[in-house]
Amino acid sequence: MNTHDRKTALVTGSSRGIGRGIALRLGQDGVRVGVHYRSNEAAAKGVVAEIEAAGGSAFSVQAELGVPGDAEALWAAFDQHSDGLDILVNNVGAEPTEMGIGGTTPQGFDGVVATNVKAPFFIIQHGLTRLRDGGRIVNISSGLSRHASSQPEYVTYAMAKSALDTLTTALAKQLGPRGITVNTVAPGLVDTETTAAKLFNEEARQFAASLACLGRLGQPDDIASAVAFIASADGGWVTGQWLDVSGGMLL
């Protein structure tokens, strides 16, 4: 069912993984989707082609996030395809490559914060002149922002996602008078290329699946369904919320 009346969305990091799932679902629901990518143009154009093959409308947008001038570059590319925005999904995230508080360098710390906090902050800041009244902002966070991990490398990532959660609630208050809702979706373990690199054998996959009440790993479609609801007219009375979409993994 078309619940969006050909609105326009921008989904960052939507050439693969969770972002790809979100872009495909929004396209299925009748949204014109800006498919953002950093370097894999072929993957982004593949998502665009899938949306169009199903009768939808989409376009690709290239910009590297987490670097100086990223928000300006992103919106300059977006403006070549659209004169306004209805749905912004901040999906891009970067996990640390350094181990815990003892092994984290200032450069590594800054890199995690730049992608997970600074980029979405300024993407929203510059996007507000394009986001129409009654629009939607959805920030993709992580269950790690509220539940400690035994893996020490995630400390900076959890901190950064917690900051993104705070941004959600602050902006929900500030943008409410314009009818704009701002919400966080927090996945647990989702079966993507990134997860596959960590769960490299069947035993590891089965253990990870057992952590969820529903007994399986999440799929990108699971996250996309939650985003689609929040972004739709049916989600118009939901704002400032942190939605656990982990299959009960965080209980």
Image: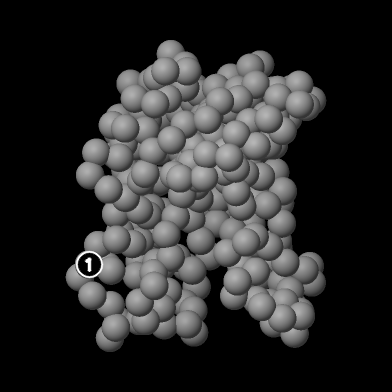
The part of the image, by quadrant, that contains residue 73 is top left
The picture quadrant where one finds residue 225 is: top right
Q: Position of residue 56 (x, y in %)?
A: 70, 22
Residue that badge 1 annotates: 107
Query: Which residue is pictured at 58% across the width and 40% down the height?
Result: 42
Residue at 47% x, 22% y is 85
Relative to residue 137, is residue 155 drawn left or right? Answer: left
Q: Nearer the viewer, residue 106 or 234?
A: 106
> Looking at the image, which is closer to me, 62 or 108?
62
Q: Is disc 1 placed on a helix, strand or loop?
A: helix
Quadrant placement of the C terminus:
bottom right
Which amino acid, mark 1? Gln
Q: Is residue 11 left or right of residue 246?
A: left
Q: How many marks?
A: 1
Locate the N terminus and report the quarter of the image it occupies. Answer: top right
**Within-10-Å neighbours for mark 1: few <14, some 14–19, many 20+:** few
Residue 11 shows up from this direction: no
